[in-house]
Image (cartoon, rainbow, N blue to C red):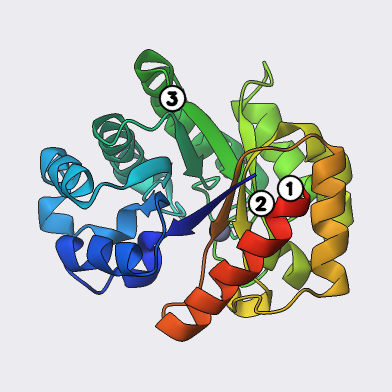
Amino acid sequence: MILSLSNGIFSKLRLDGNFAAVKQLGFHDIEFNMKSIKKEHDTDVYREQKALVAAGLNCLSLHSAVLHVKDPIEVHQAVYYGKISLECARALHTSLVTVHSNVSKKLPREIREQCLQEVFGEIKPFAKQLGIKLSLENLSFTSTGFGKNVEQLEEVLAVIDTKSEMGITFDLCHALETKEVYNLLDAYGKRICNVHMANKAHQPFTRETPELTAFLTKLHDCCYDGPITLELEHRTTMEEIAKSKQLFEKILKNY
Ligand SMILES: [Zn+2]
């Protein structure tokens, strides 16, 4: 398993400051979160590429910009967000992109299915063309999006992933909040290709808890060897991030 940091935590900083903070903490691998990019610059992927190279960081994965569509009129915007995220992933040389279902949990089922088909009907072939694997994230009950438990994720995958090609991004914070850790692990253990690591409310783990140990043991049993991406609340201090990093450097040696 590889320790990584989501740079979304520094999204309030300019990109050079963002990467500098990541480096200051001593991380080498990152998940690039699209919220680090200002909207007016979101087609300027070469700027991100240059900054990443200059910082000497490695982009293990990218978190797509997402829009939880609550009306079919928004489908085009969700497709645009998805495609520009994929362009950015290509520029940053990563082939793993975390996505949400991109549909609101408030949509009626038939409209939800129609929107899922339209959004992923465009995003999936584009990802394939770029050689990028899409990885669907489990959401929390606080999210406006659809896809918080196995039942909901199965409904989504039945529409957008009939060939079982997509991976799963396991967000431990969301799974703890929804009490779905074991249901999700049982259903998707072998399909996990990214882990978002945080305690409830995206607080950092600064010591090993029984829940954390049980989760990592089960993950290890599934032969998981991908990223452990610290995805933390943006008010987390540098000291707390450093402490969490230290903890995982120590723990991950056992897996
Ligand atoms: Zn997440």
Q: Residues within 10 Å of mark 2 (few under 14, many from 20)?
A: many
Q: Residues within 10 Å of mark 3 (few under 14, many from 20)?
A: some
Question: What's the residue type where badge 2 is placed?
Answer: Gly
Disc 2: which residue: 147
Q: Residue 110 shows which numbered tag?
A: none
Residue 83: x %, y % from top left: 31, 34
Element assignment for label 3:
loop
| Nearest to the observer: residue 100 or residue 20 | 20
Residue drawn at x 67%, y 69% is: 141
Ligand 1 located in image quadrant:
bottom right
Q: Is mark 2 within 8 Å of ligand 1?
A: no
Disc 3 from disc 1: Cα separation: 24 Å
Q: Residues within 10 Å of mark 1 (few under 14, many from 20)?
A: some
Disc 3 from disc 2: Cα separation: 22 Å
Q: Residue 152 shows which numbered tag?
A: 1
43 relative to 34 in the view: left or right: left
72 relative to 217 in the view: left or right: left
Residue 179 visible in this rendered orientation of the protein: no
| Mark in the foreground, 3 or 1 | 3
Residue drawn at x 39%, y 63% is: 26
Q: Earlier in the sequence, mark 1 or mark 2?
A: 2
Question: What's the residue type where badge 3 is placed?
Answer: Ile
Q: Are marks 1 and 2 in contact (CB under 8 Å)?
A: yes
| Nearest to the observer: residue 225 or residue 179 | 225
Disc 1 from disc 2: Cα separation: 5 Å
Residue 91: x %, y % from top left: 24, 32
Quadrant housing residue 211: bottom right
Residue drawn at x 87%, y 48% is: 218
| Nearest to the observer: residue 49 or residue 246 | 246
Disc 3: which residue: 132
